[in-house]
Amino acid sequence: MTTAKQKEEQEWQCGKCGGALQRGKVKVTYLGNDFEVEEYKCPSCGFVLITEKLALGQMAEVEQSLEDK
Ligand SMILES: [Zn+2]
């Protein structure tokens, strides 16, 4: 059995300038509230990649925390 190590960190390319995206804190507004989430963004042009999986998961958490209040 071969255990080829897969890169866990997928490399994302900027949709605008083609540069490598880096993970970082990004401010998003959801339901009238500002949140800081970790997303991929381009250090060159400021493009932010919101991955659907990531966004949905984080937004679900946000909604829960809002309902707790
Ligand atoms: Zn870019």
Image: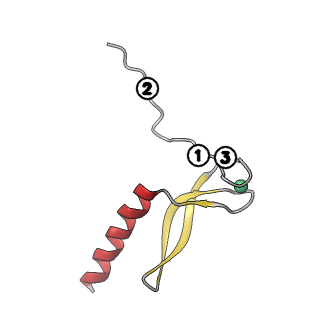
Q: Amino acid at mark 3?
A: Ala
Q: Residues within 10 Å of mark 2 (few under 14, many from 20)?
A: few
Residue beneath disc 1? 12
Q: Are marks 3 and 2 in contact (CB under 8 Å)?
A: no
Q: Amino acid at mark 1?
A: Trp
- Left or right: 3, with 69 as reference point: right
Q: Residues within 10 Å of mark 1 (few under 14, many from 20)?
A: some
Which numbered mark, 1 or 2, is in the foreground of this view? 1
Mark 1 or 2 closer to N-term? 2
Residue beneath disc 2? 5
Splitting the image into 4 quarters, where does residue 65 fall?
Answer: bottom left
Q: How is the image coloured?
A: secondary structure
- Left or right: 66, with 6 as reference point: left
Question: Where is 13 relative to 4, above or below?
Answer: below
Q: In the image, residue 16 lies at what x, y percent?
A: 71, 55
Quote the CA–CA distance across marks 3 and 1. 6 Å
Residue beneath disc 3? 20
Q: In the image, residue 45 lies at what x, y percent?
A: 74, 60
